[in-house]
């Protein structure tokens, strides 16, 4: 068994969050897997799955020496820092990967649809210009640029998955906000939002590993085209909770944090034809309503 493991292609997971854990079952048995983790408390989970933890910190370049030449495949889940407009973590990771005779052959990165910025509710696809309107989006644009340049210079096949709001059927629904009765925008001020179930995002990553084209970006979103308030109403109705109050943008700005308000200031409708045509994806949950039905909640 140990000999078989050594003969398998080596794969490095960077970041041990929820989506990485959901992706893991699709990888086990096919690769010799390593996980770069910052939190020592996460190591026990990964070790129990047959994954070898590598304790390191993307904010500390000296700690990343062990990843150089370690794996031929890299799955990059780690988010950027929470400040600035650069992704120093991705920069540090690339610097570590480059300092090896054996470079990765394949790299998949989970980005965000926030790279497009506010599009005024327009439909868009992956050819849309990247014009982030938040520092969060700017950091992701910076990361994408670093990774694409790394791919062009080294021949590593880099693919990008631009994920919108990630949810699942339990913890990532906005139930806490609904219980608190937090307001949302009235219809005339509302914005379009986009969604992907965490299980579908994990499946898309596995598909991109085999079918993603080099230097290619993919909108990793479902078929839902919901205004934000309608999304909250849908979840509220399905879970037997009161619908949130609706306020004007000016009124809402007085009651929510600047970060929450920034999420309510970008409106776009994202097409997902590329994941269906190129990755040949079939979503488990094509819409949020489908996921709520699967959860066992009545959805009209």
Image (cartoon, rainbow, N blue to C red):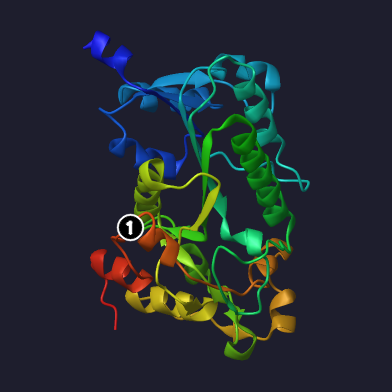
The residue at which mark 1 appears reads as 281
The image quadrant that residue 23 belongs to is: top left
- Count neighbours of disc 1 (C-alpha within 10 A) and say few if under 14, some if 14 to 19, many if 20 or more: some
User: Which corner quadrant holds the C terminus?
Assistant: bottom left
With respect to residue 122, does 102 lie above or below?
Answer: above
With respect to residue 108, does 127 lie above or below?
Answer: below
The image quadrant that residue 9 belongs to is: top left
Query: Which secondary structure lies at badge 1?
Result: loop
The residue nearer to you, when weighing 299 against 99, is 99
Tell me, yes or no, if residue 74 can be seen here: yes
**Residue 226 x, y percent position in the rendering:** 47, 78
Judge from the rendering whether residue 258 lies leftward or rightward of residue 281; answer left or right.
right
Tell me, yes or no, if residue 173 can be seen here: no
**Residue 96 x, y percent position in the rendering:** 64, 22
Judge from the rendering whether residue 5 lies leftward or rightward of residue 288; answer left or right.
left
**Residue 268 x, y percent position in the rendering:** 58, 74
């Amino acid at each position: 068994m140990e000999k078989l493991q050594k003969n398998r292609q080596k794969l490095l997971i960077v970041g041990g969050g929820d989506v990485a854990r959901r992706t893991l079952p699709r990888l086990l048995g096919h690769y010799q897997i390593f996980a770069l983790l910052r939190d020592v408390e996460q190591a026990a989970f990964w070790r129990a799955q047959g994954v070898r933890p590598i304790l390191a910190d993307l904010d500390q370049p000296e700690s990343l020496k062990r990843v150089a030449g370690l794996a031929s495949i890299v799955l990059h889940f780690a988010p950027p820092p929470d400040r600035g407009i650069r992704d120093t973590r991705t920069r540090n990771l690339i610097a570590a990967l480059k300092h090896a005779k054996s470079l990765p052959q394949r790299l998949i990165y989970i980005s965000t649809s926030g790279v497009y910025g506010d599009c005024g509710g327009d439909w868009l696809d992956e050819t849309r210009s990247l014009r982030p309107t938040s520092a969060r989006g700017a950091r992701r644009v910076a990361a994408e640029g670093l990774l694409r340049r790394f791919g062009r210079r080294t021949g590593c096949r880099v693919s990008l998955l631009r994920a919108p709001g990630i949810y699942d059927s339990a913890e990532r629904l906005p139930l806490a906000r609904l219980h608190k009765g937090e307001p949302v925008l009235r219809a005339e001020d509302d914005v379009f939002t986009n969604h992907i179930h965490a299980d579908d995002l994990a499946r898309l990553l596995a598909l991109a590993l085999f079918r993603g084209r080099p230097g290619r970006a993919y909108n990793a979103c479902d078929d839902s085209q919901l205004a934000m308030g309608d999304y909250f109403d849908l979840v509220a109705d399905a879970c037997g909770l009161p619908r949130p109050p609706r306020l004007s943008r000016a009124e809402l700005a007085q009651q929510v944090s600047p970060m929450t308000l920034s999420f309510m200031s970008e409106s776009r409708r994202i097409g997902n034809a590329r994941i269906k045509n190129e990755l040949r994806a079939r979503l488990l949950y094509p819409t949020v309503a489908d996921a709520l039905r699967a959860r066992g909640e009545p959805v009209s």
